[in-house]
Image (cartoon, rainbow, N blue to C red):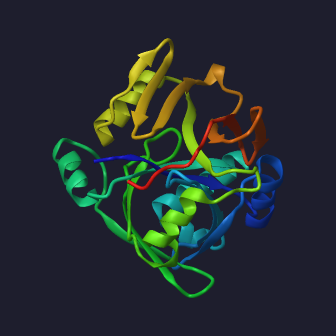
Amino acid sequence: MVTGIDHLVIAVPDLDTAAQELEQGIGLAVTGGGRHPGAGTVNRIAFLADGSYLELMAVEDREAATAQPLGAAVLRTLDERGAGLAALALVDDHLETTVAELQANGSSLGPVQRGSRMRPDGEMVEWWTAFPGSLGLDGVPFLIRHAYTGSEWGPTALAERRSYVHPIGSPVVLARVDVATPDPQDLAARYLRELGLEFWAVLDLAVCNVGRHVIRLVPNREMESPAAVTLGAQVETPRSLQALGLRIDVEPVAAPVVVAP
């Protein structure tokens, strides 16, 4: 069962420059990350208090990246837009069961596959994913399950993440992702067919609650960017940043600290 948005994959040409833009422009600290062995990609991560994160991803080996679903989506984003939201990942801690049920109902989700990356300190981070036939903003999200162990995903790390104070001055949570599309209802039907997620119509939008998060499919004419991300933090006034091929908004919330599940 999908329980929320796990992370946003943001394709960038240069990790250090992108990390600096997030910290200086919106007050998000970008840490962690590493290389994906054999996949041709490298990342940096902005961990959020609700358990989600923003993943900045760049390409080191174009040929290797092309052979992977996520690497190919990142390359396509870089080639077409220079940077931007390449994919959404939804978390499901019972991934194998969910995938089997969706496949039995006609979903194009591929087999569950192990993924990993090497941290700079030499620790291996592991996860398992299932990718749809069409990945990207014009497709549907992929599903992921993490190995909750080690210095990045173990209980201590997750607890520290919930109270981590970013340069903005407080913990930060993910609230909503808006995706521009020519036909919100058509894309919503694909989400239902591939992932079992139901949207409802709100005027000309399609809206879905995914755990504590919201995904909105918005007509192209109403979006200045292909995607927009809304975060919550203890700020006095809203903030907005147009960078990395998308818009990032920060809205005031009273106490964006998430208790342990």
**Location of residue 154 in the rendering, given as x and y in whole percent from the top left corner:** 44, 72
Q: Please state the horizontal and vertical placement of residue 18, each as a whole percent of the image.
A: 76, 58
**Residue, x 31% and y 51% (percent of image)?**
109
Q: Which residue is drawn at the image coordinates 49% and 64% (left, top)?
A: 158
Residue 139 placement (x, y as % from top left): 46, 41
Q: How many marks?
A: 0
Furthest-top residue in view?
203
> Eyeballing the image, is 62 above or below 198?
below
Q: In the rendered view, would you say 15 is above or below 204?
A: below
Residue 66, visible in the rendered structure: no
Q: Nearer the viewer, residue 172 or 13?
A: 172
What residue appears at the point 54 percent right and 57 percent down from the top-left corner?
162
Q: Is residue 56 left or right of residue 181?
A: right
Residue 199 in view of the camera: yes
Q: Is residue 182 positioned above or below 81 on the image?
A: above
Of residues 253 and 179, which is closer to you in this image?
Answer: 253
